[in-house]
Image: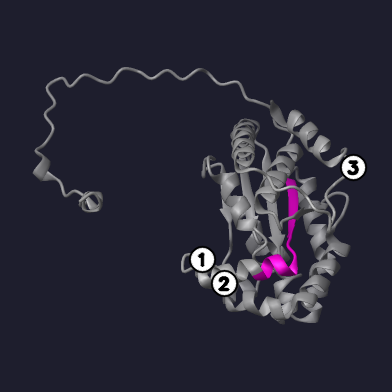
Amino acid sequence: MGGASVRRDVQHATGGAGGQGAPRYGVSVAKLADRVYEKELYRLQTELVQMQEWVKASGARVAVVFEGRDGAGKGGTISRIIQYLNPRVVRVVALPLPTERERSQWYFQRYVEHLPAAGEVVLFDRSWYNRALVESVMGYCSHDEHRLFLRQCPIFEQLLVDSGLLLVKYWFSVSDEEQERRFQDRINNPLKQWKLSGVDLESRLRWVEYSRAKDIAFVHTDTPESPWYVVEADDKPRARLNCIAHLLSKVPYHHVLQAPLVLPPRQPDQGYVRPARDTYTYVPDHVASLLR
């Protein structure tokens, strides 16, 4: 199938390559049936495997930036992208808070070492845009540092693109009401509480400030060479499919011919005797207790 076919699918869904007919805020859209979602997700994930093989064979370098409000669905989309991919080829970078040493470096320096080498794809779960967003809103950087970032970021990204790196940037957009619903779900679900931090909760109090920070960042960094692509993410399944299909359309991959795999016969025992079972320490059969 390849990237060209996926690009046609995206253009058909949005009304053309220029984005005419793309979903707009306030427009009601039909909910996707689970069976339709699962079938299309599997198809797209199959194409992601083909893309991965092309990246590895061609030596391409691909970096994908995922940004957006807390609870917008970035992590879920990333999880679906990497589900069947080789972690040695496609990896996720989600950096912790910078160390004292890193704070003394050029701001972009700690991100540079995580950029892909030939034959690699890197998915940035948050990125250098922390400075334009959370650091600026929460007061973790100075006004001068913020302005310097806005001036240097387009140059930094232009250097990456000029070096041959394919850079794709996504902003996951979620409504106030949907973010509140997801935050409440995290509060009430012990499996998801770890996803909420003090900064996440503070972001609710600074909703408008975050909106302004995003708008300012877009003015400076939404360039023809490195544009932002907005993913409307109130509907998680739709957002995941839309993002994956679009990503496939931006990578000029094609199916790589591979030699058919043939399973060889097992080596004969040739006198080998397996040690007694009591030689090893086995994991207890926990499942047996569930069947009583």
Distance from disc 3 to disc 2, alpha carbons, whole Å, reads 37 Å
* Residue 22 inside the magenta-drawn segment: no
Residues tagged 1 and 2 counted as in contact (Cβ below 8 A)? yes
Type of the residue with mark 1: Lys
Residue 255 x/y as whole percent? 65, 25
* Residue 167 inside the magenta-drawn segment: yes
Distance from disc 3 to disc 1, alpha carbons, whole Å, reads 38 Å
Tag shown at residue 53: none
Q: Residue at x 67, y 61 (%)?
A: 72
- Picture quadrant of residue 75: bottom right
In primary-sequence order, the first of circles 3 and 1 is 3
- Per the image, the residue denoted by label 3 is 18
Query: Which stretch is magenta?
Result: 166-180
- 112 or 292: nearer the viewer: 292
Type of the residue with mark 3: Gly
Tag shown at residue 196: 2
The local secondary structure at tag 1 comes to loop
